[in-house]
Image: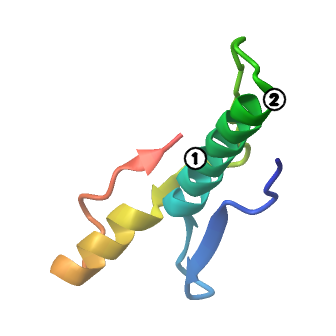
């Protein structure tokens, strides 16, 4: 399974931030594991599975969940951690 967009651009022309869409990354990972478990049960597969998640271009990206929470609480991003 592949997703080609895990970030969202936020802000103005002069102050742009890129936000990592956490729910998308975690949701697709969870869906893939669930799908593999279902196929394993249906096929009677008793072996192991290997999964990998890779993200590129996420340097200085802010977590969408953290951004939304901070915006809701006080409207600032001063304490927002960066990924990467």
Furthest-left residue in this view: 74
Q: Secondary structure at mark 1?
A: helix
Residue 77 shows in the view? yes
Which is nearer the eye, 54 or 47?
A: 47
Q: Residue at x 72, y 11 (%)?
A: 47
Q: Which mark is residue 39?
A: none
Disc 2 marks which residue? 43
Q: Is residue 49 left or right of residue 4?
A: left
Q: Residue at x 62, y 72 (%)?
A: 8
Identify whether 26 is placed above or below 19.
Answer: above
Quarter of the rendering containing residue 21: bottom right
Residue 74 shows in the view? no
x and y percentages locating residue 9 in the rendered image: 62, 75
Identify whether 54 is placed above or below 66.
Answer: above
Q: Residue at x 70, y 14 (%)?
A: 46
Identify whether 82 is placed above or below 51.
Answer: below
Disc 1 marks which residue? 30
Q: CA distance from mark 2 to mark 1?
A: 20 Å
């Amino acid at each position: 399974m592949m997703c080609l967009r895990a970030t969202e651009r936020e802000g103005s022309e002069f102050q742009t931030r890129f936000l990592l869409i956490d729910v998308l990354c975690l949701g697709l990972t969870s869906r893939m594991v669930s799908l593999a478990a279902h196929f394993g049960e249906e096929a009677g597969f008793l072996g192991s599975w290997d999964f990998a998640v890779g993200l590129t271009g996420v340097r200085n990206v802010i977590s969408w969940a953290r951004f939304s929470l901070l915006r809701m609480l006080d409207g600032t991003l001063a304490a927002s951690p960066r990924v990467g």
